[in-house]
Amino acid sequence: MGNEAALRSSMVSLAVLMALVWVWTQSLKKTLVTYLIGVCLIAGVLLPDWDFFDRPFSRWIYPVSAEERAAALAGKSGPKRIRVYPLRIIVYCTVYGFAIRKWWTLVST
């Protein structure tokens, strides 16, 4: 249920951002680019299978074992938390920073 609320609020925020871009630039192309980049960024955070990615990076190339799946299901009893891995933060910051920089360059010109 929490993911649905997060998705809903993210999509509403994206709609507000699109309206602001339209009012500021009066460009349908820039508004559509804002929509596409926003949907991709939202999907990158809310849609991944975090049980799969909530493992050390070196284990990502292997399928989830039965023990790992059982441990993930047992850990869902409390509040769902995403573990912080430095590599994940570096990848997200790099990809999102690049996308936002390119979007800003397009919208501001």
Image: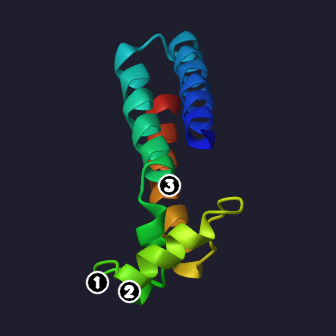
User: Given this view, does label 3 or label 1 mark the residue nearer the observer?
Assistant: 1
In this orientation, which residue lies closer to the viewer: 65 or 107? 65
Residues tagged 1 and 2 counted as in contact (Cβ below 8 A): yes
Decide which of tag 3 and tag 2 comes sooner along the chain: 2
User: Residue at the spot x=46%, y=45% of the render?
Assistant: 41
Position of 78 with respect to 58 (left or right) is right
Position of 52 with respect to 6 (left or right) is left
Looking at the image, can residue 109 be seen? no
Residues tagged 3 and 1 counted as in contact (Cβ below 8 A): no
Task: Report the residue marked by disc 1.
Answer: 62
Q: Position of residue 26 (x, y in %)?
A: 47, 10
Q: CA distance from mark 3 to mark 2?
A: 24 Å
State the image quarter where residue 85 is shown.
Answer: bottom right
Task: Report the residue marked by disc 3.
Answer: 96
Decide which of tag 3 and tag 1 comes sooner along the chain: 1
Q: Which numbered tag is attached to residue 24?
A: none
User: Residue at the spot x=63%, y=41% of the render?
Assistant: 2
Q: Which numbered tag is attached to residue 59?
A: 2
